Amino acid sequence: MNRLAPLVLQIVLLVASASIANPLFATPSPVADKGQRFFDATYSEAAELRVLYVDSTGWAYRDEAGELTGVTVEIMRRFAEWSHDEHQRALALEFVEERDWSTFYQRVRDASGGVFGLGNVTITETRRQELAFSPPYVTNVAVLISHHDVEPVDDRANLALGFANLSALAFAGTLHETRLRELAERHWQGMPLEFSGSNDDIIARAADGTHFAYIDAYNYYRARQNGAPLHHHPAFDDPGEEFGIIMPLDNDWQPLLAEFFHADGGLLSRTWYRELLSYHLGAEVAEILLGQTVAH
């Protein structure tokens, strides 16, 4: 046994060094999210799917009665109804909250089977390498905001002058951070940049008059409706990014979800979808996101 000790020690050290150099040997996440696969559910009475979500007012939130609802939550419930009606396949949805957006993203990425994520994730080619996306459920406009007493900055070239007494604030790991870094590189090298973990905090610090930041248009208008003293600078608007429901790459429910999105002329044209936007986000925000008038 003593002769084996050096060999065992060498093996331990080799594995330890491999775990540092190669992520394939890294310690797996303590959370292993799984959902039933479409293939395995062929002969089941009901398939059990897991739906992770990040709390976001209007999109995935609990109402005054404590019930989970919101635009993306109701889209998933409609998908379950449609699956039953059109394909006689019942879906049982297990909604699971994840408070941290970065952890939410990682959990869906590292999950397997019938797992879905609701977190207003922008569809990008880079992310397609590690996630599957539904067709887009909304096209977003990113807006740059500050306290309403800050003079309007009508030219990107005036970024440093217009916000000289403020610091930039970003939701770490999002495209909003990327936007601010690109602005700094082009128009304000040395721009002070700080980070936050929530949209509510970003809005509060912009409303305090200490920061400027990119946020999604619906968050800006909702904050303004709630009385936040904010102003948005249209010269910095960045329209056109699309949000999708995310899935692990091996989620074989993707074709069925895509079929649901494209049915009856497409999700974005359906009356119930437009009513969802107006009800949960407000008519003004719905009009902006849809690009046309929505019934109040």
Image: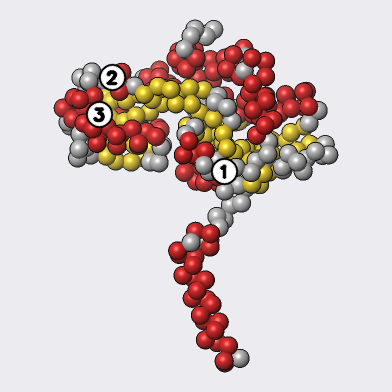
Disc on the earlier residue, 1 or 3: 1
Find residue 134 and report its horizontal and vertical position in percent: 59, 30
Q: Which residue has dot 3 on it?
A: 209
Q: Are marks 1 and 2 in contact (CB under 8 Å)?
A: no
Residue at position x 48%, y 9% in the image: 292
At label 3, the amino acid type is Gly
Comparing labels 2 and 3, the label whose residue is closer to the camera: 2
Label 1 CA crowd tier, 10 Å (few <14, some 14–19, many 20+): many
Image position of 287 (left or right of 169): right
Distance between the alpha carbons at the discs numbered 1 and 3: 36 Å
At label 1, the amino acid type is Val
Residue at position x 41%, y 37% in the image: 174
Distance between the alpha carbons at the discs numbered 1 and 2: 35 Å
Q: Which residue has dot 2 on it?
A: 235
Q: Residue furthest bottom?
A: 2
Q: Secondary structure at mark 3?
A: loop
Find residue 62 and report its horizontal and vertical position in percent: 57, 30
